Image (cartoon, rainbow, N blue to C red):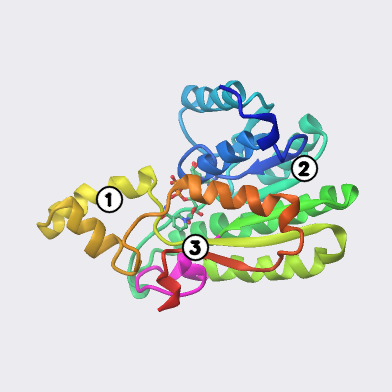
Amino acid sequence: MKAEPMLRSLSGKVAVITGSTSGIGLGIARSLAAAGAQVALNGFGAPDEIERIRAGIAAEFGVRTGYAAADMMQPAAIERMMAETLREFGRIDILVNNAGIQHVAPLEEFPVEKWDAIVAINLSSAFHTTRLALKAMRRHGFGRIINVASAHGLVASPFKSAYVAAKHGIVGLTKVAALEAAESGITCNAICPGYVYTPLVEAQIDGQARAHGISRDQVIRDVLLAQQPNKRFATVEEIGALTVFLAGDAAASITGVALPVDGGWTAH
Ligand code: NAD
């Protein structure tokens, strides 16, 4: 069923969402499409599964969709993705920097190649997409850059040095982009989720239950959500709805913020 026209506040807008073949990025792409935006997808996965996702969003929401396989570790691939999107769609109005990976290890043992990969994917890729998108957005005097950071962009946890450093970094980049673009109708904000229920999180629950010898419910409450006072996962739909809001006209004066969606985690 197609969304009601009155809800399609982003009709005519073109959105690029990095890391949108799974989890939060896919949820954001679906929410933007439901609001009428054309969406350019990116991320890894089996080609037939990605094509099923792309065609499915197009059919479900009646919007134009595209896909670029660009590896967010590769600046040249990012440049090609942004150029191809501009060629195919004619404009870029909304950029969501979402692609991200995690690795957990003590600092002294943290693999150097994991540090480099996390900084490249979780932080530097957003610098590259942003520098290229800003040019295109300035031409139309409108733009929305939305960075999916993390509660770990605001506070730290042990054993996540690269992730925490990259997420704090993207919060800083968000503020700089907001200031530089402030007079051009372009906003830049970061969303800082706590734990969000995605396939990545689901995959950890049974393993943690076995490792700790406790139930799934105990893992969720006492391990995963130990820091999250409301003891519930945020959903990808909640993150998607916030993204749609930040992309819309009502959020024109919201820029340079890092907005926690963490059930109170960073209120500690
Ligand atoms: P996910 O693993 O489900 O999705 C990650 C996406 O990024 C996938 O589409 C994957 O293909 C893509 N990706 C990974 N490496 C890539 C690369 N080199 N080039 C291009 N695409 C690449 O994870 P998720 O839980 O949906 O996380 C998405 C974002 O949200 C990440 O930035 C993550 O740090 C952030 N986040 C997640 C949570 C959570 O609880 N799930 C909490 C806070 C922040």
Some atom of ligand 1 lies within 8 Å of the CB belonging to the residue at label 3: yes
Q: Which residues are magenta?
A: 149-165
Residue farthest along the bottom direction in this orientation = 268
Q: Is residue 207 left or right of residue 75?
A: left
What residue is shown with label 3? 150
**Alpha-carbon distance for marks 1 and 3?**
18 Å
Give the residue number, with chain letter if any, for mark 1. 204
Helix, strand or loop under label 1: helix
Would residue 228 be found to the left or right of residue 191 on screen? left
Compared to residue 153, the image places residue 45 above or below, namely above
Q: Answer above or below: position of 52 versus 14.
A: above
Tell me which amino acid carries mark 3. Answer: Ser
Residue 58 location (% of width, % of height) = 61, 24
**Sequence order check, earlier mark of 1 and 3:** 3
Q: Quadrant of residue 223?
A: bottom left
Pointer 2 or 3: first along the chain:
2
The residue at which mark 2 appears reads as 92
Q: Is residue 37 visible?
A: no
The image position of residue 248, as x and y in percent, is: 71, 49
Q: Residue furthest left?
A: 213
Amino acid bearing label 1: Gln
Disc 1 residue crowd, few under 14, some 14–19, many 20+, Cα 10 Å? some
**Looking at this view, is 65 or 43 the one in front?**
65
Instruction: Give the residue at x 39% y 46%.
Output: 198
